[in-house]
Image: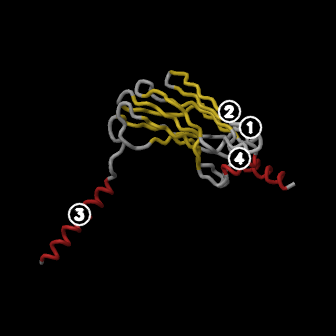
């Protein structure tokens, strides 16, 4: 009976769940032959309780002229079957035309998925490694996103934002406020030195 109540609670909390996928790329200088890693996270479930994710798929669109695909490493929150130890089913299809199809299906039961995912505000779905072959603005976006709960029901309204990275230069510059704080600290040091002399 207790197991049935847990499953019923999990099912009720997943009915209206929304989420977003985040493309996270390290902010650093990328030159020719460097490895760029695009981490794809799932985040922002809207109801305060993390619904279980048992399957996902998406297309990652990236510029073939600037990057070449190397490999995909899947996260550790779906491949958690502790009963039969059947690994999750993963698919990576480098279809070309700037598109990479990625999916994972978990064979784990509700208890294993709950133990692996409960309480997380976000977790890694996959890391995609690219080799930088040319310099310029690399734009990444996700399409055909599908995320499913334990019962095979798709989550509604899964969103994602595009990300751009400038290859060949530092991706970001210091904020004006941090520059102002630095200048203020220098002025205070110089001012305190003058006070000591007088």
Tell whether label 4 touches label 3 (CB within 8 Å): no
Name the image quarter holding residue 105: top right
- Of the two numbered discs 3 and 1 on the same chain, state the one appearing first in sequence: 1
- Of the two numbered discs 2 and 1 on the same chain, state the one appearing first in sequence: 2
Relative height, residue 137 to residue 120 (above, below): above
Left or right: residue 81 versus residue 58 is right
Relative height, residue 180 to residue 127 (above, below): below
Tag nearer the camera, 3 or 4: 4
Q: CA distance from mark 2 to mark 1?
A: 15 Å
Identify the residue at horizontal 68%, vertical 36% (top origin).
88
Determine the residue located farthest toward the front in the rendered image. 85
Identify the residue under disc 3: 186
Tag nearer the camera, 3 or 2: 2
Q: Nearer the viewer, residue 125 or 82?
A: 82
- Give the number of callouts: 4
Identify the residue at horizontal 77%, vertical 40% (top origin).
84
Q: Quadrant of the C terminus?
A: bottom left
Tag nearer the camera, 4 or 1: 4
Q: CA distance from mark 3 to mark 2?
A: 57 Å
Tag nearer the camera, 2 or 1: 2
Identify the residue under disc 4: 113
Name the image quarter holding residue 55: top right
């Amino acid at each position: 009976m207790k197991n049935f109540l847990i499953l019923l609670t999990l099912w009720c909390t997943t009915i209206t769940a929304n989420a977003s996928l985040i493309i996270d790329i390290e902010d650093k200088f990328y030159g020719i032959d460097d490895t760029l890693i695009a981490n794809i996270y799932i985040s922002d479930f809207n109801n305060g309780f993390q619904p279980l994710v048992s399957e996902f798929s998406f297309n990652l669109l990236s510029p073939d002229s600037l990057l070449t695909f190397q490999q995909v490493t899947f996260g550790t929150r779906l491949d958690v079957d502790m009963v039969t130890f059947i690994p999750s089913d993963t698919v990576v299809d480098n279809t070309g035309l700037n598109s990479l199809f990625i999916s994972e299906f978990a064979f784990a039961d509700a208890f294993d998925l709950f133990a692996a995912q409960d309480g997380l505000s976000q977790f890694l779905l996959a890391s995609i490694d690219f080799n930088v072959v040319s310099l310029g603005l690399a734009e990444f976006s996700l399409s055909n996103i599908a995320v499913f709960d334990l019962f095979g029901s798709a989550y509604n309204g899964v969103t994602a934002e595009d990300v751009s990275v400038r290859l060949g230069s530092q991706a970001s510059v210091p904020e004006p406020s941090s520059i102002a704080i630095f200048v203020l600290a220098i002025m205070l040091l110089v001012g305190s030195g003058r006070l000591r002399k007088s």
